[in-house]
Amino acid sequence: MTEHVKAWQCIGCGRIEAPQTCIGVCQDRKVEFVYAFEHEEALAQLRLARRREDALGALVRRLAFTTPHEGEWEHSYRALQKQAHRALAGLAGDDAAELDRAVLMES
């Protein structure tokens, strides 16, 4: 996980300062920041996308490399369809759990 730095932000102009030991060579430069909760939310979405990719990639590989026996294509299709339903249901559960975690982190 990344390290968070606490800083002061002006509620008027938005200037951000963090107390540091000054050695006398400071210069102000433009930098870009994101709020920690936005960063954490993006990481949560990335984790969810990776889980989706893993689950759906596994299903696509099974579909690509499965050759049904003669006359058994429908049985194979139905089995793959059930696996797809289970994968989608699991991903929907992951979505809800990830949303719950994100809400808890904001509070």
Image: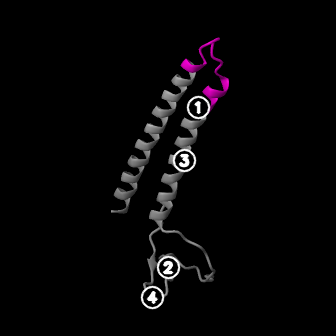
CA gap, disc 1 and disc 2: 47 Å
Q: Is residue 80 above or below residue 24?
A: above
Marks 2 and 3 in Cβ contact (< 8 Å): no
Q: Is residue 2 above or below residue 75?
A: below
Q: Is residue 39 above or below residue 53?
A: below
Label 4 Cα crowd, 10 Å radius (few <14 / some 14-19 / many 20+): few
Q: Where residue 58 is drawn, which disc sits there?
A: 1
Q: Which residues are magenta?
A: 59-75
Q: Amino acid at mark 1?
A: Ala
Q: Is residue 86 above or below residue 6?
A: above
CA gap, disc 3 and disc 1: 14 Å
Marks 3 and 1 in Cβ contact (< 8 Å): no
Residue name at image x 34 percent, y 57 percent: 104
- Which residue has dot 4 on it? 12
Q: What kind of element bears circle 2?
A: strand
- Residue 16 picture location, percent across and down: 50, 79
Marks 1 and 2 in Cβ contact (< 8 Å): no
- Which residue has dot 2 on it? 17
CA gap, disc 2 and disc 3: 34 Å
- Which residue has dot 3 on it? 49
Residue name at image x 57 percent, y 20 percent: 74
Out of 89 and 46, give the one closest to the viewer: 89
Out of 68 and 51, give the one closest to the viewer: 68
Image quarter hosting the C terminus: bottom left
- Residue 41 picture location, percent across and down: 47, 58
Sequence-wise first label, 2 or 4: 4
Q: Amino acid at mark 4?
A: Gly
